[in-house]
Image: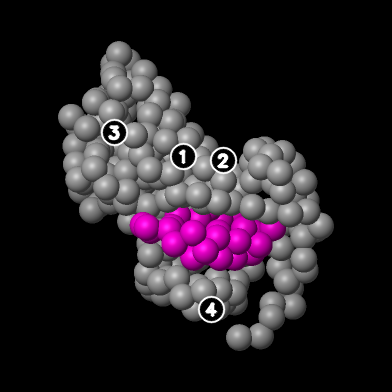
């Protein structure tokens, strides 16, 4: 497929990007379902410091570089589960064209594209809602899994869910925190849980940090969980969750 002439996604970044990985665990089977790839700097600097260098001029290149680096690193460390990659909805002009390099990289390093999950966060305001829906549908049609991250926190919310039903829905960590003692959060969660079940969407509790939070969601039937309770992100390494 030819290069997209509308954006700078093939222009090399002026700063280095590395990847850390954090497990998403299935608490019912005590196995890792997937590892989320999290961007880091050359010396392991946090995501905030790296993203602060992203501008309108290098947005497209940054998005493509992160995808490629995540897949290449996952293949290098022989990631023992699915790979979850965040993408920036405003860094895509045309779904098929912007997906080409991802597919090429997966094929080059022999990483099954069926084991890749694309997740979009609600933190970023989506400039073109219809395009994002088209992106999701294209990814799903191509055999990738899809997820909405930080659900309930940002801009997309129920409007996006009404137009597209992803495979996975990641609950915002603000809802997770101390939910075992917060009746309001529990009521909101119960509503989201019912909607997800009705639509055939699997929930992920993201940002689980305590035994009480873990136990609440396990009892509620949310088998997929992620957070410091299990493991912190590890640079270019797939950490083994702590089940103690």
Residue 5 can be seen in this image: yes
Which residue is farthest bottom? 1
Residue 85: say if magenta. Answer: yes
What residue does disc 1 label? 150
Give the answer, above or below, for where 196 lies relative to 115: above
Report the Cα–Cα distance between label 2 and label 3: 30 Å
What residue does disc 3 label? 243
Give the magenta range. Answer: 62-89
Q: Earlier in the sequence, mark 2 or mark 4?
A: 4
Give the answer, above or below, for where 147 lies relative to 112: above
Packing grade of label 1 (10 A; few <14, some 14-19, many >=20) is many
Q: Is residue 187 left or right of residue 135?
A: left
Report helix, strand or loop for mark 4. helix
Question: Which disc number belongs to residue 86?
Answer: none
Q: Is residue 136 left or right of residue 129?
A: left
Report helix, strand or loop for mark 3. loop
């Amino acid at each position: 497929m030819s290069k997209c002439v509308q954006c700078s996604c093939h222009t090399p970044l002026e700063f280095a990007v590395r990847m850390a990985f954090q497990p998403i665990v299935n608490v019912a089977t005590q196995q890792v379902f997937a590892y989320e790839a999290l961007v880091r700097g050359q010396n392991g600097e946090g995501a905030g410091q790296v993203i602060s260098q992203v501008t309108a001029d290098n947005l497209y290149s940054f998005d493509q570089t992160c995808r490629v680096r995540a897949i290449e690193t996952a293949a290098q460390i022989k990631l023992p589960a699915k790979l979850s990659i965040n993408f920036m909805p405003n860094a895509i002009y045309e779904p098929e064209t912007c997906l080409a390099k991802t597919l090429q990289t997966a094929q080059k390093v022999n990483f099954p594209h069926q084991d890749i999950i694309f997740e979009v966060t609600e933190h970023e305001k989506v400039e073109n809602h219809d395009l994002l829906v088209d992106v999701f549908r294209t990814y799903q049609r191509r055999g990738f899994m899809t997820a909405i991250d930080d659900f309930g926190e940002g801009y997309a919310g129920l409007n996006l869910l009404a137009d597209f039903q992803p495979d996975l829905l990641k609950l915002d960590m603000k809802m997770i925190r101390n939910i075992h003692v917060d009746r309001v959060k529990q009521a909101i969660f119960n509503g989201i849980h019912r909607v997800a079940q009705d639509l055939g969407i699997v929930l992920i509790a993201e940002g689980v940090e305590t035994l009480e939070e873990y136990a609440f969601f396990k009892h509620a039937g949310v088998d997929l969980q992620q957070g410091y309770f299990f493991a912190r992100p590890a640079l270019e390494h797939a950490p083994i969750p702590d089940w103690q």
